[in-house]
Structure formats: C-alpha cells, structure tokens
C-alpha cells in the first residue's frame, strides 16, 4: 500500500469512518503559520477524503495570525507556537484546555545554491562560520529570537556579528537564494521549500532549541468536533512520515 493510501486508511480508522459511519461533513477554518504550511498541505487532503470534512487554511506570519484572531477573524482551530497560543488564551481567543503539542522543529542554516557550505558541526565550528561570514539573515520568529538573543551570546560573539545581521522583511532563505546575504538562519522546515539554496544543516544541538507548534480550539469554533478530529489525525503515527518529510518531528504524546 502506498504511503498516501496508508495515511488515508489510518485517518479513516482513527475517525471511525471505515464502515460508512462518516459524520456530517463540516468545514473547519484553520489559522496557522508558514512554518507548518507544507506539513498541513501534505496531511489535509487525506483527512478530507477520509472524513468528508473540508479544511480551509489561512497562512500568515505568527504575529499576523495572532493579530487577526484578536481582531475577531473567525477560526475553529489555531496552529501556532506555544507563546502565541498562550497570548491568545490570555486574551480569551483560544481555549487553554484544548492546547495540544503537534510538531517539533529545529533551527538550521542555508547558503545560496552552489556556495561553499561552512562547517557547523560543533559550537566552535559555528562560531568560526559566523565570524567569517560577511552577512547573516535571520527570521523574525522564534528561530530568529533564539539565534539573535541566545546563540550568539552563548558563543561570545554578539558584538562582532550583530552589525552584519539583519531580519528585515523577507524570508532569510529567499534572501540567500538571491545572493543578498551569505548565511540564512531559519527553521529547517521553512528553508526546505525554497529554491536556490542549499541547506547546510541544523545548528549544533547544544545551542539549538526545540520550537514547538501546537493546536488550540477557539471559543467561537462552529465545528469543534471536526476540529478535534483533525487535531487527533495530525498526531497519529501514520502522519509522521509527512511531518518528517517537511522538516519537523511529531511532538511526543503525553
């Protein structure tokens, strides 16, 4: 059985739909961010085919998604990082009891396609690569925060490298592909889809951080049961190959 067929069968099984027991079809409004866009694009079709539900996905930056939900934009389900979900829960826009970890991500480095890949296999090697680079782009999100506020500080090179670092609008990987910057720092899942770059690898584990993405239902959810079915599906073992193919790991089940 092909991977896609296995995924659809697993979806149907976990939703109890294999014997004509499909529930009333629902339309689920999902608000999420670009880091998980390709994972969800890989998972949603099998979920829709097996469940009969329809998922409408809106993809924004984390800050934009938070602002939209706070301003009253409708969604049944939110898929963002814990700080954003916590912020929305505090604002009464996400039901804190429904927050569930979904995916884990790591920070990586990329260069323009064909460029020499620096050694980043150890903290000392990464330090050397960053000091020698002429320009470094990093993201505005959690990976960029960790890189700019933690990693370069731990390496003791913050003052040397900050003048050549930038996080102005535009994905770091896209800027590396254009040749605007030498090194791009971003989550590996966000670097993988970008043409014109080569991924050097994930940053050393003792400097890296696990970025968690999780789901949460909104109090305004019109289709809470269908949304819960989607949450359950994306955490099923059968979904793991799609998650890994797109640069993340399934979050461990509690």
Image (cartoon, grey):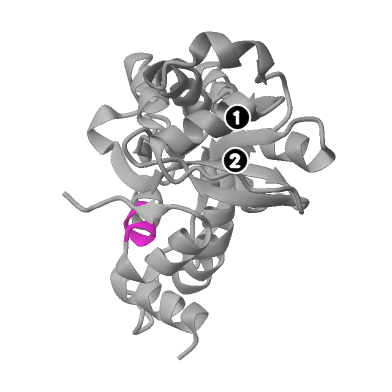
What element does badge 1 sit on?
loop
Image-based side of 154 in relation to 182, left or right = left
* Extent of the magenta region: 231-235
Give the vertical position of 242 relative to 70 (above or below): below
> Considering depth in this image, is 107 or 45 the residue closer to the camera?
107
Residue at screen point 49% across, 42% down = 120
213 drawn magenta: no
Image-based side of 197 in relation to 15, left or right = right
What element does badge 2 sit on?
helix
> Considering depth in this image, is 198 or 29 the residue closer to the camera?
198
- Looking at the magenta stretch, what is its main secondary structure? helix
Q: Are marks 2 and 1 in contact (CB under 8 Å)?
A: yes
> Considering depth in this image, is 244 or 119 the residue closer to the camera?
119
Residue with the mark numbered 2: 34
The 10 Å Cα crowd at callout 2, few under 14, some 14 to 19, many 20 or more, is some
Regarding residue 211, the answer to whether it shows in the image is yes
Image-based side of 124 in relation to 111, left or right = left
Give the vertical position of 84 relative to 38 (above or below): above
Q: Assign the N terminus to one quadrant of the image.
A: bottom left
Quadrant of the rendered image containing residue 13: bottom left
> Considering depth in this image, is 86 or 219 the residue closer to the camera?
86
Expressed as whole percent of the image width and height from the top left, the position of residue 162 reads: 59, 13
Give the vertical position of 84 relative to 110 (above or below): above
On residue 61, which mark appears? 1
């Amino acid at each position: 059985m092909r991977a896609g067929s296995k995924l659809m069968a697993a979806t149907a099984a976990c939703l109890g739909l294999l014997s004509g027991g499909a529930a009333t079809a629902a339309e689920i409004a999902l608000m999420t961010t670009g880091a998980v866009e390709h994972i969800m694009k890989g998972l949603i079709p099998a979920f829709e085919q097996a469940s009969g539900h329809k998922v409408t996905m809106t993809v924004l930056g984390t800050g934009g998604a938070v602002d939209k939900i706070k301003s009253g934009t409708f969604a049944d389900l939110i898929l963002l990082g814990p700080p954003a979900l916590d912020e929305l829960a505090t604002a009464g826009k996400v039901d804190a009891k429904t927050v569930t970890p979904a995916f884990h991500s790591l920070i990586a480095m990329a260069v323009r396609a064909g460029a020499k890949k620096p050694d980043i296999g150890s903290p000392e090697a990464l330090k050397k690569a960053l000091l020698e680079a002429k320009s470094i782009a990093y993201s505005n999100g959690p990976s960029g925060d960790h890189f700019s506020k933690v990693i370069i500080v731990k390496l003791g090179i913050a003052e040397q490298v900050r003048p050549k670092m930038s996080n102005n609008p535009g994905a770091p990987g896209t800027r590396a592909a254009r040749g605007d910057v030498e090194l791009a720092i971003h989550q590996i899942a966000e670097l993988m889809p970008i043409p014109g770059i080569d991924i050097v690898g994930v940053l050393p584990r003792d400097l890296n951080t696990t970025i968690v993405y999780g789901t949460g239902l909104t109090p305004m959810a019109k289709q809470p049961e269908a949304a819960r079915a989607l949450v359950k599906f994306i955490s099923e073992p059968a979904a793991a190959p799609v998650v890994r193919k797109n640069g993340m790991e399934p979050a461990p089940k509690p």
